[in-house]
Amino acid sequence: MNSNSIPMEDGRVTSAKEGVLPSSASVWGQYALAMLACLAVMLALTGNSYWLNIICWTFLMAGLAGAWNIIAGFGGQFSLAHGVFMGIGAYTTLLLYTKLGISPWFGLIAGAALAALCSVPISWPTFRLRGPFFAIATVALNQIAFVLVNYSEGLTGGPRGILVPFRASFANMIFIERWKYALLMLAFMAIVTAVAVFVRRSRLGFQLLAVREDEDAARAAGIDVLATKLRGMALSAALTGAGGGLFAMYLRFVDPPTVFNLVEVAVKFALLTLVGGLGTVAGPIIGAAVLIPLENYLQGVLGGIIPGSHLVVFGTIMVIFALFMRRGIIGAIDSLLKMRGGRKQ
């Protein structure tokens, strides 16, 4: 806990900047209710394959955005290299399964571990940079990874990618019923959200917040800034790697443009989090719940009329959010509640 954090008598924690955090019982109670609500929505849509597919993508992208939010939202490090960690997880899971016959369940763990290990040498030099220079450096890392994987045809399949044969079984993580995938994605989102809740209230969480607000002040307070960033990035990368494995097994295919696509992967993580609420636990979930179904709806309605028109509408919505809801949906709701409370007083 940093010098700006003060333990309260009832077990809550306060910081000089953000006020008193809710009690653990309250936070975990809200978490349980939110996950049960997501489960209820999934169960209500089990008879509709189209919406189940959207639910799968919503849960998966919410989990991946939540993993990104740990380092970007809590730590203030706006990384666009998370496609690299997602790719590491995806390729590790599929290579272990297709070449060595190792179950994807173990492949997810291996992919997460490898992504965390790779995040340290990848992040160490870039963390010397700040602001937009850090973001630009992470974009370069994404492109480097794309080129390496694309030209390593003997290992990764190169541009052809890796295709997983359909052999349905629990051990192979291949299911006939789509609701099983939805349940798997929900479990992933629940785990990532639980980790985010724990980190936000932990020593690492307060150190990340201190680094986000002012690196020099955090260093003066005795925080090892580089070590804090590296720990946050390793945790974020591990969760992203696991999500990459799930992504690959859901598609049963992976190639360089799929996982190293800057717009569809790294930028989308940022968009979902920014729209929902950057630096909040629930932000990535709310952002995914709004944008993923909306994107699919616009693509279905407008994509067939004028190719690409759904992207124009989607981009316009993003601009509106950037102009009028800079703190995201959660920030807008919080402001409205404060205004309403002020009027009552």
Image: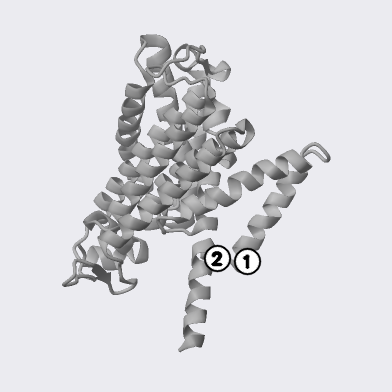
Q: Which mark is residue 323?
A: 1
Q: Quadrant of residue 268?
A: top right
Amino acid type indicated by mark 2 = Arg
Callout 2: SS: loop
Which residue is rendered at x = 59% and y = 44% of the image? 292
207 shown above or below 265: below
Amino acid type indicated by mark 1 = Leu
Q: CA distance from mark 1 to mark 2?
A: 6 Å
Which residue is rendered at x = 32% and y = 26% of the image? 110
181 shown above or below 186: above
Mark 1 and mark 2 in contact? Answer it, CB < 8 Å: yes
Tell whether 27 sits left or right of 49. left
Label 1 packing within 10 angstroms: few (<14), some (14-19), many (20+): few
Name the one closer to the observer, 258 or 330: 330
Name the one closer to the observer, 23 or 164: 23
x, y percent for residue 70? 37, 51
x, y percent for residue 142? 49, 37
The residue wearing badge 2 is: 326
Label 2 packing within 10 angstroms: few (<14), some (14-19), many (20+): some
Which residue is rendered at x = 40% and y = 55% of the image? 281
Tell whether 41 sits left or right of 279. right
